[in-house]
C-alpha cells in the first residue's frame, strides 16, 4: 500500500491518511478487537504468586519497624542520624506498618475477588 500525499495551497506536502478498507484482515469499524486469554491454570498461578508476594511483603513491612535489632541498629541508620531520628518516631513506624497492613489487604482482596476468565465458545 502506498501512501499518497497532496500539495496544499501554501506549498507544503500533507500525507493522506490510509484508507482502512485497503488493509487486509482489518476488523470492521466499531468491532471489538480479539482478546487472547491466558489459560486458566496460568491465571490461577499468577494470582497465587501475586497473593503470596503481597502477603509476604506486607508482613515484612508491618513487622520490620518494630524489630529493634534490625530497624535501630543497622549501619545505614547509624550513618544517617537525621533520617534515623525521623524513622525512630512512633508515628512514622506506625505509618510504615499501616502500609504493610494495606499490602496484606490488597493481597487478600485479590484472592477473594478472583474470577476465571474463560474464552467464549
Image: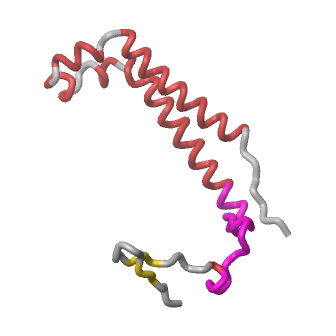
Which quadrant holds residue 40?
Answer: bottom right
At x 69%, y 66%, the residue is 35
Residue 20 percent across, percent down from the top left:
63, 78
Q: Nearer the viewer, residue 52 or 91?
A: 91
The correct choice, above or below, for 12 with respect to 91 in the image is: below
Q: Nearer the viewer, residue 118 or 14?
A: 14
Residue lying at the far front of the rendered structure: 9
Which quadrant holds residue 41?
Answer: bottom right
Q: Is 53 colored magenta in this rendering?
A: no
Residue 89 percent across, percent down from the top left:
32, 10
Residue 106 percent across, percent down from the top left:
59, 34
Q: Is residue 38 left or right of residue 58?
A: right
**How are the residues colored?**
secondary structure
The correct choice, above or below, for 45 with respect to 51 in the image is: below
Q: Is residue 6 left or right of residue 82?
A: right
Q: Is 36 colored magenta in this rendering?
A: yes
Q: Nearer the viewer, residue 119 or 29?
A: 29
The C terminus: image quadrant: bottom right
The correct choice, above or below, for 45 with respect to 78 in the image is: below
Q: Is residue 90 left or right of residue 40?
A: left
Residue 39 percent across, percent down from the top left:
70, 65
At x 41%, y 80%, the residue is 7
Write down the region rendered in magenta: 21-43
Amino acid at each position: 500500500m502506498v501512501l499518497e500525499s497532496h500539495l496544499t495551497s501554501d506549498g507544503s506536502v500533507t500525507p493522506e491518511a490510509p484508507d482502512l478498507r485497503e488493509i487486509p484482515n482489518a476488523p470492521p469499524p466499531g468491532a471489538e478487537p480479539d482478546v487472547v486469554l491466558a489459560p486458566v491454570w496460568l491465571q490461577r498461578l499468577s494470582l497465587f504468586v501475586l497473593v503470596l508476594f503481597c502477603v509476604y511483603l506486607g508482613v515484612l513491612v508491618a513487622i520490620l519497624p518494630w524489630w529493634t535489632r534490625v530497624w535501630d541498629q543497622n549501619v545505614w541508620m547509624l550513618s544517617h542520624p537525621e533520617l534515623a531520628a525521623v524513622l525512630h518516631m512512633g508515628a512514622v513506624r506506625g505509618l510504615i506498618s499501616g502500609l504493610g497492613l494495606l499490602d496484606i489487604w490488597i493481597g487478600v482482596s485479590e484472592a477473594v475477588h478472583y474470577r476465571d476468565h474463560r474464552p467464549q465458545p
